[in-house]
Amino acid sequence: MKKILIFWLLCLVGFSQTSGSFKQANDLYNSGYYKKAIDRYGSILASNLHSAELYYNLANCYYKLNEIGPSIFYYEKALQLAPNDSDILNNLEYAQKMTVDAIQEVPESDASRLLNKILNSSSIDGWATRCVGLALLFVILFLGYYLSYSEAKKRLFFVSSCMILIALFISLGLLFKKDNLQSNTQPAIVFVKESDIKTEPNLRSETSFTLHEGTKVLVIEDYNDDWVKIKLLNGETGWMTRSELKAL
């Protein structure tokens, strides 16, 4: 019993300290001390605590300092935890307008656009939670069907459980699709002022094109500890050194 009490006391102390640090960081930001606020927010991240609000505030600090790469990186991190947050989406759009590279995305079909919108409506954890909830609901409805004596109730429980089962299979398919996409394409942000993208993974190869700070790319292949193959939204590919990127 004492151990349980000590555990909860430690949790409360840790939560109190984190809340205090977050408030101090916010006060520093509101006072215009952006670098100090970054250090304070960074200390919270170092304690392995993450939230959309924390990433969003950190991104705002970098944006105020005109550090576009880090600001876009942390807006994207915030968006991973809160995909539909309008404030994050708006600020990310403002930051992206300050980048040098104007990359036109390959046009998508209506079906592909709809699928991506559905997939991005929730994180992998969100889709997993939805699947668990649907599975539990199906079990409850199936038990209702099994235990009911009334034909009308049996029919209602049967139809409802079938609809929930279909929704469960669809959600599972979307979950595996999103997980597969994230596993095969790792998004990253360019963190250097300028980077020459090579045709092959070595410095002596020809330069295919040039990217600048803040551009979002997809890492599609690892060559070794130094080189990665990247893909742009317009479909172009090339090689760049891993140290010039920061993976999301």
Image (cartoon, helix red, strand yellow):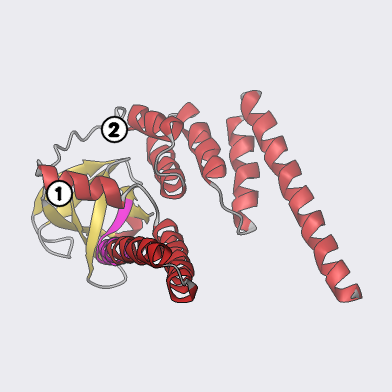
Residue 101 image point, x, y percent: 21, 35
Residue 58 image point, x, y percent: 53, 39
Question: Is residue 184 in the magenta section?
Answer: yes
In the image, is 38 to the left or to the right of 223?
right
Rendered position, 71 above or below 134? above
Quadrant including the C terminus: bottom left
Dot 1 lies on which element? helix
Label the magenta part by its dominant secondary structure.
helix
Residue drawn 73% across the image and 44% down it: 19
Question: Is residue 199 in the magenta section?
Answer: no
Residue drawn 29% across the image and 32% down it: 99
Question: Badge 1: how crowded within 10 Å, few (<14), some, or many (20+)?
Answer: few
Residue 187 lies in quadrant: bottom left
Residue drawn 32% across the image and 49% down it: 120
Residue 211 image point, x, y percent: 21, 43
Residue 123 lies in quadrant: bottom left
Q: Nearer the viewer, residue 141 or 224?
A: 141
Of pointers 2 and 1, the one earlier in the residue sequence: 2
Q: Which residue is mark 1?
A: 112
Residue 111 image point, x, y percent: 13, 47
Q: Which residues are magenta?
A: 172-188
Q: Is residue 106 visible?
A: no
Q: Which residue is mark 2?
A: 99
Q: Nearer the viewer, residue 9 or 209?
A: 9
